[in-house]
Amino acid sequence: MAVTDLADLAAPTIALLVLAAIAAGWVDAVVGGGGLIQLPALLLVPGLAPVQALATNKLASIMGTSVSAATYYRRVQPDLRTAIPTALAALAGSGGGAALASWLPGEVIEPIVLVALVAVLVWTVTRPTLGRANDLRWSGRRHYGAAVAIGVGLGFYDGLVGPGTGTFLVIALVAVLGYGFLEASAKAKIVNAATNLGALVVFAVAGAPVWRLGLVMGAANIVGAYLGARMAVARGSGFVRVVFLVVVGGLILRLGWDVLAR
């Protein structure tokens, strides 16, 4: 049976999706990558088409990401002069990616992403001081130009594929621009909220989201996001770095399994 509304799902299925959304919200708030949990949970629901799962995931994610972005802003006060241009570029990029998501097969993207994640993991592990504090590479136009390029590229990826976008945003802000992990995570939430919005608008026009399911999961995502953001701020960049490595490792295992299982 095709799923078109929350009422089409059994209570145990809804309960599992809510738990997945809480966990995803926490992970996303700390370091990104909550889609590793939330999107696969939706894809496992019988009768839910892949494009519906992608769209509903975006609806739930934007609710949690918006709350974690607001929490970070109050407590970390990230520099919006970098975050806003990056977010606007990501918004445009994610709309373009979502427009392609319905016909470009995931097997074209996943091996490339897998190699990139392995490289990121090795690079981060071998540089224990990476991201402890802000050490910006450039200033002025070069800084903002690099930030906008990051926004467009990762926004497009988020609209097209999704899982791991927040993680890629964090590592790009740390490795390319030179931010500390905590500051990068705070900025990444603002940018990720924009990428979710861009993709959601495109999916909504196509009628893809299961709205009531997405809103219920979004409420659960908010709970996890609020708790995760507060914990990240309290424990600092060292804690964020550890969670980052765990999430990247999980993404590698998940994508590796998908690639090998074909």
Image: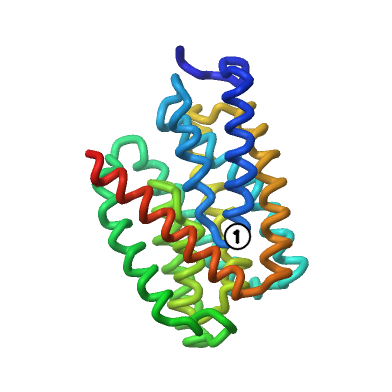
Residue 233 visible, this orientation: yes
Residue 4 in the image: above or below residue 219: above
- Give the residue drawn at x 54%, y 34%: 56
Residue 81 visible in image: no
Q: Position of residue 232 (x, y in %)?
A: 67, 65
How many numbered markers are drawn?
1
Up the image or down, 173 lies above or below 3; here it is below
Q: Residue at x 74, y 60 (%)?
A: 71
| Residue positioned 70% across, 68% down in the render | 233
Q: Which residue does the numbered mark 1 point to in the structure image? A: 189
Asked whether 170 or 228 is in front, the reply is 228
Crowding around mark 1 (Cα neighbors within 10 Å: few <14, some 14 to 19, many 20+) is many
Quadrant including the N terminus: top left
Could you say which quadrant of the image residue 133 lies in?
bottom right
Instruction: Give the percent coordinates (x, y) of residue 249.
Output: 42, 59
Q: Amino acid at mark 1?
A: Lys
Residue positioned most to the top: 1
Quadrant of residue 213 in the image? top right
The reply, left or right, for residue 63 in relation to residue 48 is right
Query: Residue 169, image x and y in percent?
Result: 48, 64
Residue 69 image offset from top left, x and y in percent: 67, 59
Q: Residue at x 44, y 67 (%)?
A: 150
Decide which of 123, 192 is in the foreground and name it: 123
> What is the basis of the colouring in this image?
rainbow
For the C terminus, the image quarter is: top left
**Residue 52, above or below 84:** above
Q: Secondary structure at mark 1?
A: helix
Q: Residue furthest right?
A: 74
Q: Where 103 sits versus 183, above or below?
A: above
